[in-house]
């Protein structure tokens, strides 16, 4: 890929990012609700509300508000949270590690489970096992994330307690750590890991089901190629055919899928963090939406938009290196 093409792709991604964040700003400001009425005390007068609106800069025309916000954004200033009274950058930085930990753990498990399952389904095409796996993955993938989370809580927390399993076998449903208990070292790490099992399992189940469905189609198409049949006719072993021909030809599609799934996993944690009370970006975003905390909502929107666009740009730049058929069009 030539340097000029890389510059054009990066410039296009930057323009798309600015378009998206501008749209987010417009949608947030047009949403019903006034932050000032939520922030003032119940006994406040109309003058108090108007004074607070002026302090927050919400009394100015929309164009002026956008110009001030855009100028601050270009300087790296996301403003201050209306409700938390701390810089938005700090609020996002405090919550980001939680979401990143959930997202990275779940996406690694998603592909570790989904890709082999999709490959197995492609090799079992037309058999009962393939039909059963297809129905199961479709059902899990179609289920709302919060429903899967509540189902896991009902089974592994309340259900485990109902049937009388010992306490160490009951998975905690809420929070990052056990409340009221001060742990250090390995004990604290194990406690956090136990609390992370259900959130990670929720994201992994939904993600792996979607990856398996895509991987099945991708691998099935590759298995039907002439070069695969020719390799088998030459007496190549099944392992060599899978590693060199099937996986090699399916890899570009899987890279694109990974790029599209990565930001989706982080965004999908919005509901998971709310159900399991994890203090990540998802829970922060929902709380900010409820409080009409515009700076935090916009900051979270910038985070999600940047993750999606950056992941797609990375896949767009890497794909020609993995797929020789694209190299001629990427020069």
Image (cartoon, rainbow, N blue to C red):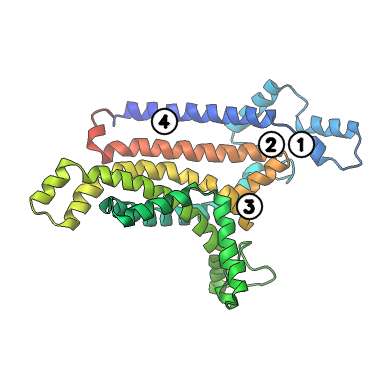
Pick the residue in front: 265 or 87.
265
- C-alpha distance separating marks 2 and 1: 8 Å
- C-alpha distance separating marks 3 and 4: 34 Å
- For residue 28, side relative to residue 131 (left or right): right
Looking at the image, is mark 3 or mark 4 earlier in the sequence? 4
- For residue 10, side relative to residue 318 (left or right): right
Q: Quadrant of residue 316?
A: top left
Instruction: Find disc 1 in the rendering and name its residue.
Output: 35
Looking at the image, is mark 2 or mark 1 earlier in the sequence? 1
Query: Residue placed at 67% from the left, 21% from the top?
Result: 63
Give the crowd class for mark 4: few <14, some 14-19, many >=20 residues within 10 Å: some
Helix, strand or loop at disc 3? helix
Instruction: Find disc 4 in the rendering and name its residue.
Output: 10
Which is closer to the viewer, label 4 or label 2? Answer: 2
Query: Residue placed at 88% from the left, 42% from the top?
Result: 42
- Give the vertical position of 9 relative to 169 (above or below): above
- C-alpha distance separating marks 3 and 2: 19 Å
């Amino acid at each position: 890929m030539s340097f000029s093409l890389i510059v054009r792709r990066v410039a296009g991604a930057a323009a798309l990012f600015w378009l998206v964040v501008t749209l987010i700003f417009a949608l947030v400001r047009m949403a019903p609700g006034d932050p000032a009425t939520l922030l003032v005390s119940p006994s406040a007068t109309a003058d108090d509300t108007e004074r607070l609106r002026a302090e927050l800069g919400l009394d100015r025309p929309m164009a002026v508000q956008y110009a001030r916000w855009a100028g601050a954004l270009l300087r790296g200033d996301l403003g201050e949270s209306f409700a938390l009274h701390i810089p938005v950058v700090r609020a996002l930085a405090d919550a980001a590690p939680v979401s990143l930990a959930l997202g990275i753990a779940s996406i690694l498990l998603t592909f570790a489970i989904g890709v082999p399952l999709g490959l197995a389904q492609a090799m079992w095409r037309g058999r009962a096992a393939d039909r059963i796996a297809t129905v199961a993955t479709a059902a899990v993938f179609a289920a709302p994330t919060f429903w899967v989370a509540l189902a896991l809580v009902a089974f592994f927390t309340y259900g485990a307690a109902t049937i009388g399993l010992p306490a160490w076998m009951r998975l905690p449903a809420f929070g990052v750590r056990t409340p009221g208990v001060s742990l250090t070292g390995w004990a604290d790490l194990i406690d956090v890991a136990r609390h992370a099992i259900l959130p990670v399992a929720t994201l992994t189940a939904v993600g792996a089901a979607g990856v398996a469905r895509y991987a099945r189609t991708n691998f099935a198409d590759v298995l039907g190629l002439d070069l695969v049949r020719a390799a088998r006719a030459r007496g190549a072993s099944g392992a060599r055919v899978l590693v060199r021909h099937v996986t090699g030809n399916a890899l570009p599609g899987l890279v694109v899928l990974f790029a599209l799934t990565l930001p989706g996993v982080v965004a999908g944690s919005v509901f998971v963090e709310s159900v399991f009370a994890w203090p990540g970006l998802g829970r922060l975003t929902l709380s900010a939406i409820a409080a009409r905390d515009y700076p935090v909502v916009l900051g979270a929107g910038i985070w999600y938009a940047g993750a999606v666009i950056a992941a797609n740009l990375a896949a767009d730049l890497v794909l020609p290196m993995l797929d020789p058929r694209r190299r001629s069009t990427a020069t």
